Amino acid sequence: MFAIKFSKVYPLYIQKAERKGRTKEEVDEVIRWLTGYSQAALQKQIASENDLETFFAQAPAIHPKSSLIKGVVCGMRVEEIEDPLVQKIRYLDKLIDELAKGKAMEKILRS
C-alpha cells in the first residue's frame, strides 16, 4: 500500500467525486485541508510521482482536526487504526468518500 504512487490514486479520487457531481477543485481542497499542501505544492507532488509514504511524510502539516474523522473505510474504523501512515491514508479515503456522498464541505472539513 505504501509503495502506491499518489499520482496513480489521485485521478481515482477525482473520478469518484466527479461521478457523484463533485469537482476536482473540491477534491484538491479536501487534500490540501488534510495535508497542509498549497495548490502548487500538491501539483508538484502529483508530478513527482512520489509514493503515498513520501507524499504524507512531506506533507507540511496534517490538520489538527483530522482526529475528528470517524467511520469505516475498507472494513476498518479509521479512528482505531494504529499505524499512523495507514491512518492518514484512510483519513483521506474517508474524506473523499464523504465528498462523493454529497456531504457539505463545512462538515467534511470539520468546520
Image (tube, rainbow, N blue to C red):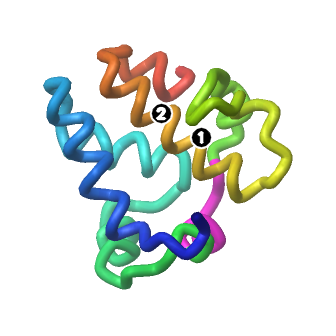
Identify the residue at image location x=37%, y=59%. Answer: 9
Identify the residue at image location x=81%, y=54%. Answer: 83
Residue 111 in magenta?
no
Identify the residue at image location x=46%, y=79%. Answer: 50
Quadrant of the image containing the N terminus: bottom right
Nearer to us in this view, 39 or 51 = 51
Q: Quadrant of residue 40?
A: bottom left
Q: Position of residue 79 (x, y in %)?
A: 76, 31
Q: Position of residue 54 (x, y in %)?
A: 58, 76
Q: Tell me the element at label 1.
A: helix
Check residue 62 in the rendering and tell me which mark sits there, or answer none.
none
In this picture, which residue range is highlighted in magenta? 55-62
Is there CB contact under 8 Å for labels 1 and 2?
A: yes
Instruction: State the residue position of label 2.
Output: 95
Relative to residue 81, is residue 105 depicted above or below?
above
Task: Give the amino acid at mark 1.
Answer: Tyr
Q: Quadrant of residue 64?
A: top right
Nearer to us in this view, 26 or 12 = 12
Q: Tell me the element at label 2.
A: helix
Q: Position of residue 51 (x, y in %)?
A: 50, 75
Give the alpha-carbon distance from disc 1 to disc 2, as whole Å: 6 Å
Instruction: State the residue position of label 1.
Output: 91
